[in-house]
Image (spheres, rainbow, N blue to C red):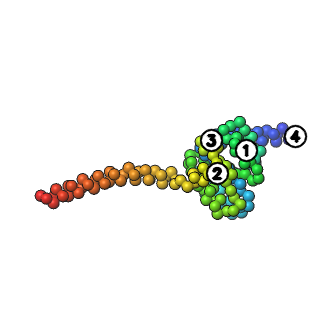
Amino acid sequence: MPNASVLEQKQKQVAELKEKLSAAVTGVVVDYKGITVADDTALRKELREAGVQYFVVKNSILGRAIEGTDLSDISSVLEGTTAIALSNEDYTAAARILCKFADSHDNFSVKSGFLDGKVVDVATIESLAKLPTKEVLLATVCNAFQAPIAAFARAVQAIVDKDGAAE
């Protein structure tokens, strides 16, 4: 039986992790075994620049944090080495970065994840990873709105130019 201070420390870790999980819009759980320190450092830097929190977590701590929540289905993959990436704003960043990293590293793999508080399968995470960034999506939407307006403006200008040439 652990002593009181160790138990208190673990309860604090569980509470902090539970808070982080509830604040996140998306999360990806990965198996990080077999990657080098240099690869891990580069991965952490890329995730940090994208606003994603990434950290190694004990399976038992994560298991207790998701116990009794909508995320409890993740407990089925809590074995081996586990790290989690959480994003509070961007739905695609963690999935995009981690899936790209997993494609180029044989031992690194995505185990599970969640989206808006609901557990999703690996296929859903991979689909999410293929979506463009928020900025690209917004630019595409703006371009779609702008194209008809630009075409209309060109048509009006052509009429004006035609009427001006007729005089």
Say the numbered circle drawn on residue 118. Answer: 3
Q: Which residue is mark 2?
A: 122
Q: CA distance from mark 3 to mark 4?
A: 34 Å
Residue closest to the far right: 1
Label whose residue precedes the other's in the sequence (2 or 1): 1
| Mark-to-mark CA distance, 2 and 1 | 14 Å
Query: What x and y, as percent, mark residue 148?
Result: 33, 51
> Looking at the picture, which amino acid does disc 3 mark?
Lys
Say which element carries label 3.
Answer: strand
Q: Secondary structure at mark 1?
A: helix
Residue that appears at 63% across and 61% down: 103
Instruction: Name which of mark 1 and mark 3 comes first in the sequence.
Output: 1
Kindly identify which residue carries mark 4.
1
Decide: few, some or many residues near mark 4? Use Cα within 10 Å; few <14, some 14-19, many ≥20: few
The answer to whether residue 93 is left or right of residue 71 is: left
Cα separation, mark 1 vs mark 3, equals 13 Å
Q: x, y percentage for residue 138?
A: 46, 50
- Point out residue 110 in the picture as x, y percentages from the top left corner: 67, 54
Which amino acid, by three-letter code, is at mark 2? Answer: Val
| Horizontal side of residue 100 vs 56, given as left or right | left
Residue at (21%, 55%) from the top-left corner? 159
Q: Nearer the viewer, mark 4 or mark 1?
A: 1
- The secondary structure type at the circle numbered 2 is helix
Residue on which the image places disc 1: 75
- Circle 1 packing at 10 Å, graded few (<14), some (14-19), many (20+), is some
The three-letter amino acid code for the residue at tag 1 is Ser
Quadrant occupied by the N terminus: top right
Q: Are marks 3 and 4 in contact (CB under 8 Å)?
A: no
| Number of other residues with Cα within 10 Å of mark 3, as a class: few under 14, some 14 to 19, many 20 or more | some
Residue at screen point 74% across, 48% down: 78
